[in-house]
Image (cartoon, rainbow, N blue to C red):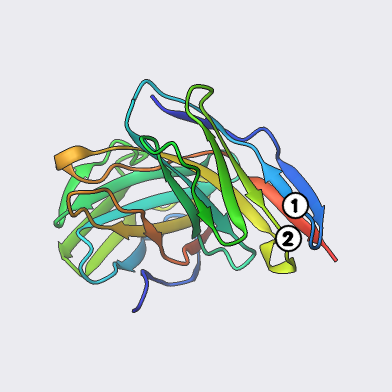
């Protein structure tokens, strides 16, 4: 079974500063995907960034980037130039590579509540 | 393009009543997932469909829960009879596979409160 651990229940950061959210996972799979989803107070689940395990290069999406360490099974999210709209719950998620069979479900961590302070 | 659409957004009902949650996936997506989010258990998969066929329902808590997908554009999750411990936010998500896994896109969720 896959497990995803987010050890920081809550974090805060000053506006315009940089913050890093931690995530570790446990799996015996070699091919898989990792995701960060954002859930603002509006309750939507918004995909922030994804990483394919076979890619060594860390994914980036504008102000969001990841530090993917496959051997350590670590997948942290860095938010640069934090904005008030970044205030949300952030969930790390794992998905096996499904191959020809198609999609697999997501395994989620317990989330980190991030507050951006003006 | 329209995202995943769920209805209702909020549902409050009394214990013992039947509850039906609805989901319209993104057009062209052939996978549909139902998740439940609670404070105690976080986000957990209940069931998912591929081309309208249930593939994995091992997360469905008990027989009181049932899900259907009569066509590619509609799915329901039904709880009968409902109990207070079913109170949670229920999310529907959809995705597609074209030789490569694609991320799941979520609806806005239904907040269910069972009194």
Q: Position of residue A74 (x, y in %)?
A: 55, 30
Quadrant of image for the C terminus of chain B: bottom right
In the picture, residue A29 is in which quadrant? top left
> Element under label 1?
loop
Q: Nearer the viewer, residue B49 or B10?
A: B49
Quadrant of image for the N terminus of chain B: bottom left
> Taking the image as drawn, is residue B80 in sight?
no
Does mark 2 fall on the same chain as mark 1? Answer: yes
Q: Nearer the viewer, residue A74 or B7?
A: A74
State the separation of the CA atoms marked 1 and 2.
6 Å
Q: Is residue B71 left or right of residue A28?
A: left
Disc 1 residue crowd, few under 14, some 14–19, many 20+, Cα 10 Å:
some
Q: Is residue B70 above or below residue A66?
A: below
Query: Could you say which disc has been placed on residue A18 in the image?
Result: 1
Instruction: Determine whether label 1 and label 2 are within 8 Å by CB.
Output: yes
Measuring 30% from the left and 46% from the top, which residue is drawn there? B47
Q: Is residue B81 above or below residue B9?
A: above
Measuring 52% from the left and 64% from the top, which residue is drawn there? A44
Identify residue for label 2: A82
Disc with the residue nearer the chain's start (1 vs 2)? 1
Q: Position of residue B46 (x, y in %)?
A: 35, 45
Q: Position of residue B20 (x, y in %)?
A: 34, 64
Measuring 33% from the left and 26% from the top, which residue is drawn there? A30
């Amino acid at each position: 079974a896959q497990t995803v651990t987010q050890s920081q229940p809550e974090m805060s950061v000053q506006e315009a500063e940089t913050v890093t959210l931690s995530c570790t996972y446990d799996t015996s799979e070699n091919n898989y995907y990792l995701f960060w989803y954002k859930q603002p107070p509006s309750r939507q689940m918004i995909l922030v960034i994804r990483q394919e395990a076979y890619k060594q290069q860390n994914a980036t999406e504008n102000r969001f980037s990841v530090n993917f360490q496959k051997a350590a099974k670590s997948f942290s999210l860095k938010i640069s130039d934090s904005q008030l709209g970044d205030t949300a719950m952030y969930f790390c998620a794992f998905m096996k590579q499904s191959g020809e069979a198609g999609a697999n479900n997501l395994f989620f961590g317990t989330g980190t509540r991030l507050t951006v302070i003006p | 393009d329209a995202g995943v659409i769920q209805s209702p957004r909020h549902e409050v009902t009394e214990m013992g009543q039947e509850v039906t949650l609805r989901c319209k996936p993104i057009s062209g997506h052939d996978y549909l997932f139902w998740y439940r989010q609670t404070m105690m258990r976080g986000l957990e998969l209940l069931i998912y469909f591929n081309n309208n066929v249930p593939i994995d329902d091992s997360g469905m808590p008990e027989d009181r829960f049932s899900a259907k997908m009569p066509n590619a554009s509609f799915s329901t999750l039904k709880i009968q009879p409902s109990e207070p411990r079913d109170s949670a936010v229920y999310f529907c998500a959809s995705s597609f596979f074209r030789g490569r896994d694609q991320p799941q896109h979520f609806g806005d969720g239904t907040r269910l409160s069972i009194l």
